[in-house]
Amino acid sequence: MKTIISVQVATLLLTAALVYAGDSIRIEGLPQDSEVRIEYSTVGCFHSAQYLLTFTSNVVHAWSLDRLWDAQSKQFSGTETNALGTLTLSSTDTRKLDQLLQFYRSDPSGGCTTIDTITVSLLKDGRVTQAENYRDGSWK
């Protein structure tokens, strides 16, 4: 289970440090007054997980968003946020991130039972100025 989570976190970290460029959010050169926020959710036959990544300049902060179960009411009652860490991205990382975004923009199809949902938002001065949504059910 830890390996799956580690791979998912690595994938998330590779989905980041984005900046507005033209009509799409792209990698590199995030201005000082901007932030990119990525919400990543993955659901499959034997797992369900959510993560939040925030990017300022070339630094990413990662959190897991764990759903809380209320045994009495037998339903989810909220979300607990757990810090996973901070990472400084290299120029190679940002180049690879751009390639990953291009893959998501290609609207990958497939019949995989695992579905990843990714929302990428660009914030300027704390306000969302642009958002992109992706759904990946491919095996790639």
Image: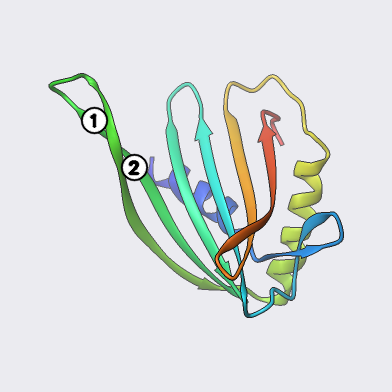
Question: Where does the N terminus fall, quadrant-wise?
Answer: top left
- Scheme by which the image is coloured: rainbow
Residues packed near mark 2 inside 10 Å, few (<14), some (14 to 19) or many (20 plus): some
Q: Tell me the CA gap for discs 1 and 2.
A: 10 Å
Q: Secondary structure at mark 2?
A: strand
Q: Is residue 133 visible?
A: yes
Number of on-image labels: 2
Vertical arrangement, residue 84 with respect to residue 48, above or below: below
Of the pair 65 and 77, the residue shown nearer to us: 77
What residue appears at the point 63 percent right and 80 percent down from the top-left corner? Answer: 32
- What is the x, y in percent for residue 66? 34, 42
- What is the x, y in percent for residue 77? 26, 32
What residue appears at the point 51 percent right and 71 percent down from the top-left corner? Answer: 87
Question: Where does the C terminus fall, quadrant-wise?
Answer: top right
What residue appears at the point 33 percent right and 52 percent down from the top-left corner? Answer: 81
Q: Secondary structure at mark 1?
A: strand
The type of residue carrying mark 2 is Asp
Of the pair 62 and 123, the residue shown nearer to us: 123
Disc number at residue 69? 1
